Every structure is written in structure tokens, then in C-alpha cells.
Image (cartoon, rainbow, N blue to C red):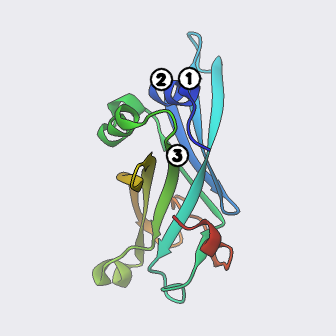
Amino acid sequence: MGLTRDDVKRLRSADRVLFTVKEGEGWITLIRQTGNEWDEEIRQTIGVDVSVKSYEEGYRGSYIEIIEAFEMLHTPRLDDEWSTVVDLVRMGDRLSFHYVVNNVSDSMREIGWTRDELSIMIHRPSKRGEKRYTFRIASVVVPRHSTARMVRGVRKSLTSLCRSV
């Protein structure tokens, strides 16, 4: 199902944006401040599809799903990529997350660091099928076993075949 007019309005007016995946299911949480204090807020969610590519040893070439992932834009109106997404998105579009997990160079691997990346895709129906626009939202470089990793676990999955983007 595509985005509604209200979804597009909420995407554009969010004060904070959370990107969450749990057990392979993804969603965007949009938070809007309603009063003078941050404890007065409205939270709304939009479900998204999730695809993932991993360079982690043992997962290359496998269909995998994310067990848990989280990222947040604290000031989305100041984020150039997010501003481009919300300027382009239209009613009827569909959004999805695409993660690249453990995307490292040899030198990063040698020192025990890793990089996880999150892109958001806009899928737009067209007369010739579907147009897709992809924007990198976040890239996190941390020690491999850090609790600050964006992606906190992956597993091999056959069901990803059905949901891959």
C-alpha cells in the first residue's frame, strides 16, 4: 500500500525520525512536538519493507534478515538527504529500507571496526513499471562488537526471498 496524503504531510513535519527494524519488520516513527516541552508529542508510524546486503563472513550471497536495527535523525529538517526524500515523496509512493551490513575495508577489518549503512528508497509506480530513488540516510562506523552499531544482528533467511526489494 502506498503513502497517504496524511503520511506525506507527517513525513515533512516531523521533528524527529526513527528508523527501526525488529525481527525483519521495518517502520519509520515520526515524532512531532506539540507543546513547549518534549514530553508533549505525537508519534505516528509508517510500515516499510526491508532489504539487506551483508559483507559479513558466512553471509555473503545469502538471503538474510535483520534481527534488530535502529537509527534516528534528531533534526531531520537540517539533514540534506532527508530533506530531499521528503521533497520528492508523493502520495501513492512506497518507502523501503536498504541496509548494507559490515561494509568494511581490509584496514577496518584489521583494527576490528565495522560500518553499517542505511538507505531509504522511494518506490514510485509508473507506466513502465516502477521507478526507484535511493538516498543514503546514515552510515555508522564503530568497533565491531559495539552496542552503538546500527544493525544489532542478522540471520540467514529463506523468507527474505519473498520480501527483497
Q: Left or right of 110: which side holds 39?
A: right
Earlier residue among tags 2 and 3: 2
Residue that label 2 marks: 13
Can residue 117 be seen here? The reply is yes
Residue that label 3 marks: 94
Residue that label 1 marks: 32
Single out the mark in the foreground, 3 or 1. Answer: 3
* Amino acid under disc 3: Arg
Q: CA distance from mark 2 to mark 3?
A: 18 Å
Residue at image location 54% in from the left, 89% down from the top: 58
At which x and y percent is residue 95?
A: 51, 47
Q: Left or right of 41: which side holds 142?
A: left
Single out the mark in the foreground, 2 or 1. Answer: 2
* Amino acid under disc 1: Arg
Residue sitting at the far front: 127
Q: CA distance from mark 2 to mark 1?
A: 7 Å
Circles 2 and 1, Cβ within 8 Å, touching? The answer is: yes
